[in-house]
């Protein structure tokens, strides 16, 4: 049987191409592997991100904006049903298991729009609330968690607390709306 020469397969050009492709795969694989596992995140002494799995599919309560950001407040089905029943306007508290998330984006002008409109740009923060009076009796049943996003790496970290940590983070701010069961956002007419 004649011997087949394979020396042409290992030319300098082919080796460079093979090594370049391997390096590209390593970089791409490293980027994919570096993606943050949000389900493993937890506020120190507080709520876990995993407790809000599926939040991005919850129904919108309302939107709001500041000078620099746009916010969407979403709620789980328990909280949406409570809103529809008139809570907290009817004087009743939200039920156990009510959860909400505030998604905040830096805003930017939509340059494609024929009129002035601002739209979400990069994710700024995520803030969670849950009503669980057995776990959080000292906060009238509410617990809070807030996450800051680093847009350069698209990773979340616990928001720097002003004076408290854990599940109480956010409670001091929400005492201003104690009459509406510690919830700022009303459910506007649809």
Image (spheres, rainbow, N blue to C red):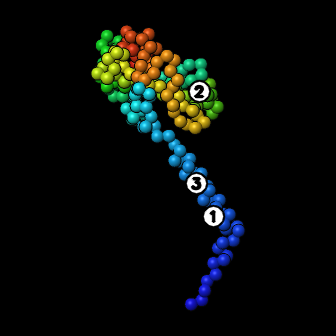
User: What mark, if any, has residue 154 been given in the picture?
Assistant: none
Q: Quadrant of the N terminus?
A: bottom right
Name the residue located 59 percent from the left edge and 19 percent from the top edge: 67
Q: Is residue 24 left or right of residue 181?
A: right
Of tags 2 and 3, the one toward the viewer is 3
Q: Which residue is mark 1?
A: 18
Asked if disc 3 and disc 1 are in contact, CB closer than 8 Å, the reply is no
Q: Which residue is mark 3?
A: 26
Asked if disc 2 and disc 1 are in contact, CB closer than 8 Å, the reply is no
Q: Earlier in the sequence, mark 3 or mark 1?
A: 1
Q: Which residue is mark 2?
A: 107
- Cα–Cα gap, marks 3 and 1: 12 Å
Above or below — where is 32 with respect to 159? below
Residue 53: which quarter of the image?
A: top left
Residue 38 position, x and y percent, is 46, 37
Q: Earlier in the sequence, mark 2 or mark 1?
A: 1
Residue 88: which quarter of the image?
A: top left
- Cα–Cα gap, marks 2 and 1: 43 Å
Name the residue furthest bottom: 1
189 and 130: which is toward the camera: 130
């Amino acid at each position: 049987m004649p011997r087949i020469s394979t020396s042409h397969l290992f030319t300098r050009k082919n080796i460079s191409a093979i090594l370049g492709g391997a390096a590209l795969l390593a970089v791409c694989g490293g980027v994919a592997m570096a993606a943050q596992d949000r389900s493993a995140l937890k506020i120190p002494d507080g709520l876990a991100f995993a407790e809000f799995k599926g939040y991005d599919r919850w129904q919108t309560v309302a939107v709001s904006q500041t000078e620099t950001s746009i916010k969407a407040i979403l709620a789980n089905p328990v909280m949406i049903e409570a809103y529809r029943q008139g809570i907290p306007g009817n004087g009743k508290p939200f039920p156990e298991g009510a959860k909400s998330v505030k998604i905040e984006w830096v805003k930017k002008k939509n340059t494609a729009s024929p009129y002035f409109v601002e739209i979400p740009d990069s994710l700024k923060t995520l803030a969670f609330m849950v009503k669980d009076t057995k776990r959080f009796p000292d906060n009238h049943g509410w617990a809070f968690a807030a996450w800051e996003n680093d847009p350069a790496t698209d990773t979340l970290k616990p928001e720097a607390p002003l004076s408290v940590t854990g599940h109480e983070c956010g409670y001091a701010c929400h005492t201003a709306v104690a009459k509406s069961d510690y919830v700022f956002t009303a459910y506007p007419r649809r």
